[in-house]
């Protein structure tokens, strides 16, 4: 397999999504924008640790940050997830074809 740099947006998104805490943070943000304080209250870790996870999510574009006064608010950004979905489409087509072929084999089998 040819070597390539692992720094594309899609690579960074997959790296960020590999961590379950980051996925949990994204799930929280699906309900709408939240402050770092509100996010940190949902986890059994120090606020600086949550901030580090948010930094990774922000670095790959999965969340956007807005500073209002002394607080920072975060929201989900959809474009990187769309890029991952685009990358996954050939695999989806592959499995759909395999399942269609399996369905044809099962349909051709006797009902015994």
Image (cartoon, rainbow, N blue to C red):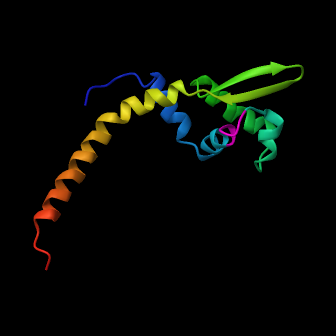
| Left or right of 44 on screen, residue 64 | left
Q: Nearer the viewer, residue 74 or 32?
A: 32
Count of numbered circles in the view: 0
Image quadrant of residue 61? top right
| Left or right of 35 on screen, residue 92 | left
Measuring 74% from the left and 38% from the top, which residue is drawn there? 49
Image quadrant of residue 5? top left
| Left or right of 70 on screen, residue 14 | left
Q: Quadrant of the N terminus?
A: top left
| Left or right of 69 on screen, residue 100 | left
Image position of 81 with respect to 9: above or below: below
Q: Position of residue 71 (x, y in %)?
A: 85, 26
Image position of 68 with respect to 103: above or below: above
Measuring 62% from the left and 29% from the top, which residue is drawn there? 56
Stretch of the chain drawn in magenta: 28-32
Q: Position of residue 98 (x, y in %)?
A: 21, 50
Q: Residue furthest right?
A: 70
Image position of 3 with respect to 32: above or below: above
Q: Is residue 29 magenta?
A: yes
Q: Nearer the viewer, residue 45 or 97?
A: 97
Q: Nearer the viewer, residue 100 or 84?
A: 100
Q: Is residue 12 magenta?
A: no
Q: Position of residue 92 (x, y in %)?
A: 32, 41
Q: Quadrant of the C terminus?
A: bottom left
Q: Position of residue 76 (x, y in %)?
A: 64, 30
Give the main secondary structure of the magenta stretch.
Answer: loop
Measuring 68% from the left and 37% from the top, which residue is drawn there? 29
């Amino acid at each position: 397999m040819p070597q390539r740099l692992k720094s594309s947006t899609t690579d960074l998104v997959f790296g960020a999504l590999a961590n379950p805490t980051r996925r949990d943070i994204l799930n929280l943000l699906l309900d709408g924008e939240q402050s770092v304080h509100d996010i940190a209250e949902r986890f059994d870790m120090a606020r600086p640790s949550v901030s580090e996870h948010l930094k990774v999510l922000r670095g790959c574009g999965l969340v956007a940050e807005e500073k209002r006064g002394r607080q920072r608010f975060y929201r989900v950004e959809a474009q990187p997830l769309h890029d991952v979905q685009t990358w996954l489409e050939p695999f989806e087509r592959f499995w759909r074809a395999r399942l269609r072929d399996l369905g044809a084999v099962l349909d051709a089998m006797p009902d015994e």
